[in-house]
Image: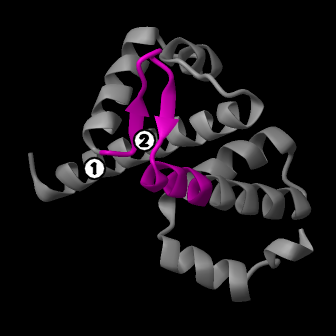
Amino acid sequence: MNDIQKNRMKQIRRESRENYLEALLILQRKREEIRSSDLASFMGFSRASVSQAILAMERDGIVSIDEKYCLHMTDAGRNIAEKTQRKHSFFEKNLLKAGVDPVTAQEEGSRLGHAISDDSFEKIAGNGMCKEEEI
């Protein structure tokens, strides 16, 4: 595997992790106890796929599983989830304001949020496009 392929695989894993964490954040705002099966239903993935992803995130210290098999984000995991959600929301709202249909705005806002670095996002959100508070 060449460096380009390795970097693409890293990006795919990062995007997947961000999506799982953002989904977990959304679910945790609705209720206290979230299990892998809840996350699988919410995301439309198999329980096996979600369990595998959760175990990897647990190894990386961004998710923990308690004695009742409930999922919890660590501070690092919550930070990633909140940044991801902020980026997605910002781009989706800007696309909607520009006249993009809602389904496309949601899909593309998500992709843009994953594609941009935190530093670039802060510059755009602060100086470039519509400011967050204007949306």
Amino acid type, label 1: Lys
Indicate how the structure is coloured in the image. Answer: one colour
Residue 127 lies, with reference to residue 6, above or below; the image says below
Amino acid type, label 2: Arg
User: For residue 29: magenta?
Assistant: no
Residue at 36%, 28% in the rendered image? 53
Residue 49 lies, with reference to residue 130, above or below; the image says above
Q: Which residues are magenta?
A: 61-84
Viewer-proximal residue, 66 or 29?
A: 66
- Disc 2 marks which residue? 17
Seen from this angle, which residue lies furthest front?
A: 67
Considering the image in quadrants, where does the N terminus appear?
top left
Query: Dot 2: what SS?
Result: helix
Residue 15's x, y, as percent?
44, 46
Can residue 112 be seen by looking at this rendering?
Answer: no
Tell me which numbered mark, 1 or 2, is placed earlier along the sequence. 1
